[in-house]
Amino acid sequence: MAEQELTVRFHTPQILTNTHTLTSASLDTLGISLSLSSARLNHSCTPNTYIVFSKVALSLRTFEHIPADTELTISYIDTTLPTHLRQAELHSRYFFICTCEGCSFLPPPKALQFPTEIIEEISHLLLAARTSQKPAQASEFLTHAVSILESLPPQRPSHVYPYPDVLHEMKHAAIGSQDWALALKYAFRFYHDIDPVQYPLSWHPVRVVHGWVMLRIMTQCATWDIFNEAGGGARIVEWHYVFRKLWKEVMEAVGKSHGDDSALVKEMNFVFPAIVNIAYPSENRSGWKGPFREGVAEEKWAALRKWLDSKESGEVAKEIKEREEKKKRGIMEGENQEEKEREERLERWFGVKKK
């Protein structure tokens, strides 16, 4: 018995340090996976490959074209962490000091970093929020964490660690409480502000999954009529344009990020009819009909951001009024312009002016 226990203690660390985190198609953690082939891959903070799972099938996909005889690498940890935190985690979990290219980069300027003591305080608040059994208490911890980050001058961008970790927890808390408008606000910040900085490749798997999550949240907003209830936001946003733009971007990227036969693609195809009903509420629902107008979608995307950034529904109502008044002025100005052009034609053709 003692010999068996010793054997287990000896091999357990070996197994844990050579396993991968088993995830769902949308990168939710399910458990661990042991693959004898992929376990031989070395780590890099700037890897040229990554692992995705489609149910229990493991796929190794590349970020870029890899020349022959180039070593394949993956990342064992979150590469968006600051260098000193990556180094510490790799040393404590995998017992080596990383000397990859990513670890040789110069650190960002102080204005783009949070002090170590602030990072530690936020880490404690995040742990307290994750382990709390009371949603209201967890929300208080997260709100306090945001207030700390926002009150510290100078104001850092939302992609600076640990901002993304806090916003990620707040997004999941909003989803858990079915506060879909708030969840959409955080999902939009990730997809539009944070992800392009942390993951420059448009088809990076994390960006694709975040886009898919945002689509599902928008589906819930439509189901519960959130836009119409929130001060008439639908008339500002015309969000089905935004929905089409987002769907187009995600569908163009998912084949490259996960594979055309992946579980994520199958999941997207499964909910396709519901998405068509939302994105094309009054058009032919047999498929995507009509041209995709990128300029219009970008305009509505900006309107969505303004709506999400509004703190009070009164601001949204004010914006609606301003847009309606501007539209009326535009119609009147257009009529006046047409009348002026008619007068100019009369004078040019017949030499007479309208009295």
Image: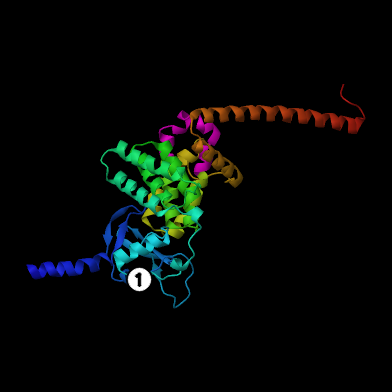
Q: Give the position of the C terminus as an image quadrant.
A: top right
Amino acid at dot 1: Leu
Nearer the observer, 91 or 23: 91
Q: Position of residue 297 (x, y in %)?
A: 57, 43
Q: Position of residue 11 (x, y in %)?
A: 19, 69
Q: In the picture provided, is 124 more to the left or to the right than 279?
A: left
Q: Main secondary structure of the magenta part?
A: helix
* On screen, residue 17 above or below 251: below
Q: In the picture provided, is 97 more to the left or to the right than 348?
A: left
Q: Which residues are magenta?
A: 218-243
Q: Is residue 228 magenta?
A: yes
Q: Report which residue position mark 1 lands on.
A: 41
Is there any visible trace of residue 231 in the rendered image? Answer: no
Nearer the observer, 67 or 198: 198
Q: Is residue 292 magenta?
A: no
Q: Give the position of the N terminus as an image quadrant.
A: bottom left
In the picture, residue 293 is in which quadrant? top right
Nearer the observer, 307 or 284: 307
Q: Secondary structure at mark 1?
A: loop
